[in-house]
Image: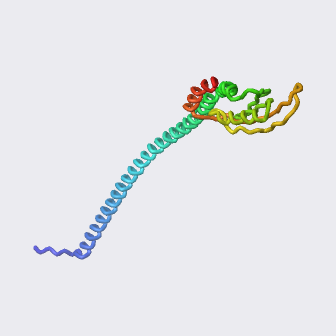
Amino acid sequence: MIRINLLPHREGKRRERRQQFYTLSGMMIALGAAIWLLVHMVNSAAVDSQTARNGIFETQIAELDKEISDIKSLREQIDRLVARKRVIETLQSNRAETVHLFNELPARVPSGVYLVSIQQTNDKITLKGFAQSNARVSYLMSSLDASPFLERPELKESKAQELNGRRVYSFEVNFYIEHSAPDSEQATEAAAPPAQKG
């Protein structure tokens, strides 16, 4: 028996194609959503990883900043200690100046010269006294100039006057203490006794 399909076959094919289109469209949408979700997850993981790294970097930077601050405070302490050390070294090198001065003066002051006062202002020493003649004052200046411990003698004043019925010359002499290195000071100390004997 012959069967006749009364349904239009073209309409059936259209329906099948439409069904295939919807199916493929749904699959493409699902695939696109899956790809977007995967990319989003990868990006989120990368952002989280970078955020974690940034947190580690920030922690390390904070630690380095603290260490830098500690180093700065240590440098300031070192600078203060170095300044104190320099002051102590200066005091240490200058503490024997008075001893040197009083050891040196008797060897440098010639006979016929009498000292009335000795005044020190920082490195400047001022001698005031009387001399029997201007030649004695000149000899005092030369003797002070020859000292390795004293320097730059300057005659401030020398004038004749009567003292106890005798003619004398009152004078004022300025000179300076020479600051030398410790080795030079030791050499000066070693050279001082022979100068006293002379």
Quarter-wise, where is residue 112 in the image?
top right
Q: Position of residue 142 (x, y in %)?
A: 69, 36
Residue 56, image x, y percentages? 44, 43
Judging depth in this view, the residue of 87 and 43 nearest the camera is 87
Q: Position of residue 121 (x, y in %)?
A: 74, 33
Q: How is the image coloured?
A: rainbow
Task: Where is residue 192? Give x, y as percent.
Answer: 61, 26
Taking the spot 36% from the left edge, 53% from the top edge, the residue there is 42
Which quadrant holds residue 120? top right
Is 171 on the left or on the right of 14, as rendered? Answer: right
Residue at image position (80%, 29%) is 130
**Residue 29, relative to residue 160: is it above or below?**
below
Q: For this view, does 46 lie left or right of residue 134?
A: left
Pick whichever, 152 or 137, lies toward us.
Answer: 137
Residue at image coords 37%, 52%: 41
Looking at the rendered image, the quarter that the N terminus falls into is bottom left
